[in-house]
Amino acid sequence: MQTLMSLSVALFAGLMLSRLAKIAKLPAVTAYLVAGILVGPYFIGALGFEGLGFISMADVDKYSIISDVALGFIAFSIGNEFRLAQLKKTGKQATVIGIFQAVFATLLVDVVLIAVHFAMPDKLPLPAAIVLGAVASATAPAATLMVVRQYKAKGPLTSLLLPIVAL
């Protein structure tokens, strides 16, 4: 029962914050992220009130099937956007840009975090700095796709952006 209540609170928080985001002319995905932080185990959940938020990461992990299904729908949706003629036109360019953005994001974050490690070795171990650099290249297609859909964006940049995010 508490799990269902926590899910209800999370959905309600997302809905209400998306209404506020609309007033502030922000994408709805921003409100969903903020709602997740608020009801998560490190904010309201840390207070320990069962049903008001997710008290532990184990509570959050109970809903992993929902996020897996959502990611499946997102991947399907991105795949549905592609047309063979469009892929022939932007495929090479999207591949080159996708690879370069991943490599440069990793290198830039690695260089900065390794410099932080040498400046403060007791605060940031070298293995953690390298792992964070590797994670920096990951992009989440969900947020990009939600913003493109919310604003009904069309044009050459959007046509190029979706294959890059999918890659």
Image (spheres, rainbow, N blue to C red):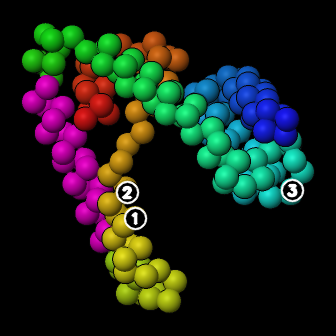
Identify the residue shown where x is 57% and y is 39%. 64
Circle 2 crowding by C-alpha within 10 Å: few under 14, some 14–19, many from 20 = some
Q: Secondary structure at mark 1?
A: helix
Residue 134 seen in the figure: yes
Q: Amino acid at mark 1?
A: Leu
Q: Which residue is mark 1?
A: 132
Query: What is the spatial separation of the Cα atoms under label 3 and label 1, in whole angstroms?
Result: 30 Å
Identify the residue shown where x is 50% and y is 27%. 69
Circle 1 crowding by C-alpha within 10 Å: few under 14, some 14–19, many from 20 = some
Q: Name the foreground residue: 112 vs 43.
A: 43
Residue 155 relative to residue 116: left or right: left
Kindly indicate whether the residue at mark 2 contacts the one at mark 1 (C-beta within 8 angstroms): yes
Percent x, y of residue 115: 35, 79
The stretch of residues the image draws in magenta is: 91-112
Chain-order first, disc 3 or disc 2: 3
Percent x, y of residue 48: 86, 56
Query: In the rendered image of this protein, does residue 80 appear above or below residue 138?
Result: above
Per the image, is 71 magenta?
A: no
Query: What is the spatial separation of the Cα atoms under label 3 and label 2, in whole angstroms?
Result: 31 Å
Query: What is the spatial separation of the Cα atoms under label 1 and label 2, in whole angstroms?
Result: 5 Å
Q: Which residue is mark 3?
A: 48
Identify the residue shown where x is 29% and y is 59%. 106
Quarter of the picture containing the N terminus is top right
Q: Amino acid at mark 3?
A: Gly
Residue 13 seen in the figure: no
Residue 57 relative to residue 138: left or right: right
Residue 142 relative to residue 89: left or right: right
Query: In the rendered image of this protein, does residue 140 appear above or below residue 144?
Result: below
Q: Amino acid at mark 2?
A: Val
Circle 3 crowding by C-alpha within 10 Å: few under 14, some 14–19, many from 20 = some
